[in-house]
Image: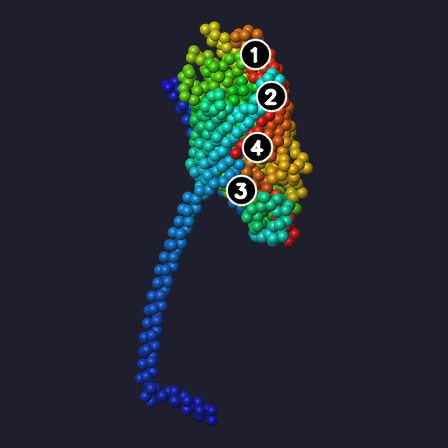
Amino acid sequence: MKKNFPNIFLIFALIGFFNIIYAEELTTINQSLKEDFKTTTTIEKKEFTLTDDQLEKLKNKVGSSIYSEYDKTIPIYLIKKDQQTIGYALEHTVKGKWGPIHYLLVVSPQGKILNIHILSYEEKRGQPIAKPRFISQFIAKSINNSIRLKKDIQGITGATISSRGITDGVRKLLTVFEEFRKL
Amino acid sequence: MNIVRLFFIFTLVLFLPHLGYSDELSDLKAQMQELKGSYETKIKELESKIDALSQAQEKQAVKTAENEKKIADSKINVDYVGRRHAPVGNGGLVVSQSSGFGNVSLGGYADLQYFDFNNGKSAFEQQRWVISVGAQPMERLRFNGEFELEDGGPNGGKDDGEASVEQAYMDYLISDLVNIRAGALLVPFGRYNLVHDSDIQELTDRPIVDRQIIPTTWTEAGAGVHGKINPVIGNYDKLEAGYELYVVNGLDTGFSDTGLRSARGSLKMDNNQNKAVIGRLNVSPFLGQEVGLSGYFGKYDTVGNDITGTALDWLSNLGPVKWSGEYAYFGVEQPNDGTEVPNFLQGGYTRLTYDFWFKELNNTFLGRSFENPKFALIGQVDWAAIADDSDADQGNNIEHRYTIGLNYRPVENFVWKLEYQWNHTKNETIERGNSHGIVTSVAMGF
């Protein structure tokens, strides 16, 4: 026990030294959009409610098995500079391994994905979905690209539900955005 | 004329009160004043009653909201989320509180195997039934356990089975970087031992290296730390690294020149009071790619002789192709009393898997009602070499195996496997000896 004491002390000292309590920042929508659009912009919020026809189209396009109550009304943020819309952000919620994942999909006026921000922290441990190594797979994709888990998007080991939630959610939002652009 | 009329009316109005009606008007005025006063008082009373009622209503609303929250928080949800998809543990059934804590998961896996070799060995084997239980009573406290019944358990059939704890550990979570774990631990030496489950693995038989060099399922009683980080190097932010580092009872003298399986430590006591240290560092440069490096150091006997191990493992996902493998080497210090033990044990395997599916099968029984069914074609080469301990005095024992297999997975955790093996042995048999034959199995996790 005596000769093991320095080792035990070292272990606890190391634990204390590396004890970084995970700071759970809440990324707000404004912070996220400021991060993406660094120039001075105004943000206008609209609520886009899909009609029954549009919902049917969405279900047919992405598969009815992944439709959820969160799909009917999508908050859409128009990012404007000098009266011109330079980007859009769609707010959405999907099912994750540890609870609902509330996220923001940022797209260009042409519908290309610029970024994805995970807003809320129901993802309790490590937020693997929020990590750049997962999110970066979606960047520059659009409705013209196939976005399927395990085919086009690599999932996160141990977080398949969350990976699938975000992948299916992004696919749905790109279809919603196409309908929104037609207005 | 009009002016006269106006003058007359004016005079009337001016002098009428003085013609005898002034008292009645005064009375009327007084009555009206009295009524006004009375109504004002009543209105004030009503206003204060309304205020009191509003306040009471607000308090009631707050109480109702609190009660509703209590009910919601105490509401228990039961949901089947799928094997290995629960927030804690490996089981697919989750019992959870609305608050998100107090989760318990339940599940497991089972398999049935059939093998038929040219050396006359042919049998059905219900080899494994594993029960998984996980619990998370608080956000930072977790339990994960697996109990295995092999070949019917110790009292099943011909009493040739066994029952054992595969893992039963508690986590005290501190941060992503450092967490404490204690219990019966799956030893992090190589990757296979950590993901050995029948429903996950592509082939029925475990690689020779993961049977006799890394004695899967290798469980040790001990404690240590684990964690992961995402270091950013310059602009590169996709890197992830994880580690596990434990102190355990360790391997004992139960090994021979045919493998390490019998040297697995006891979950009850240590043969030599000297603890072993074991750890694995895994690095993933980006999603789908992983390399692991493992180390083991400990004394195996009561006179201080060492056994030291090193392992390298890898996993690479490239679209439908997966390349995985591992290599392990143990060096064994020779006792001075003349006892001969193998001075090294080493082995490795490499496996290629190709996933595919034919859309034409979607409406057949193979594909109908399944979301993502798939086939997999597998090719594997494995080998092991163990130094002779002079029992047979024939030289080192070496075994090779070549396997080709085909799998069908209607869903992720149900698999039917079919494979053909060719085994070649030099000197003593390590696993299958010189033999070839069919091995098939079905495995299901839930």
Which numbered disc covers residue A95?
3
Distance, label 1 to label 4, CA atoms, is 36 Å
Distance, label 4 to label 3, CA atoms, is 24 Å
Give A131 or B250, whichever is nearer the viewer.
B250
Give B436 or B102, whichever is nearer the viewer.
B436
Which numbered disc covers residue B414?
4
Do badges 1 and 4 share one subunit? Answer: yes
Which numbered disc covers residue B258?
none
Label 2 belongs to which residue?
B116
Badge 3 crowding class, 10 Å Cα cut-off, few under 14, some 14 to 19, many 20 or more, is some
Residue B167: percent from left, percent from top:
46, 27
Which secondary structure, mark 4? strand
Residue A51: percent from left, percent from top:
60, 53
Q: Residue at x 39, y 87 (%)?
A: B13
Distance, label 2 to label 3, CA atoms, is 46 Å
Label 1 belongs to which residue?
B428
Q: As shown in the figure, which amino acid type bears the numbered disc 3?
A: Lys
Asked if the residue under mark 3 is in contact with the one under mark 4, i.e. CB atoms within 8 Å, the reply is: no
Q: Residue at x 62, y 48 (%)?
A: A58
Which secondary structure, mark 1? loop
- The quarter of the displayed image where residue B287 is located: top right
Q: As shown in the figure, which amino acid type bears the numbered disc 4?
A: Phe
Asked if the residue under mark 1 is in contact with the one under mark 3, i.e. CB atoms within 8 Å, the reply is: no
Distance, label 3 to label 1, CA atoms, is 54 Å
Give the chain letter at badge 2.
B
Which secondary structure, mark 2? strand
Q: As shown in the figure, which amino acid type bears the numbered disc 2?
A: Asp
Q: Is residue B378 left or right of residue A23?
A: right
Residue B200: percent from left, percent from top:
56, 29
Do badges 1 and 2 share one subunit? Answer: yes
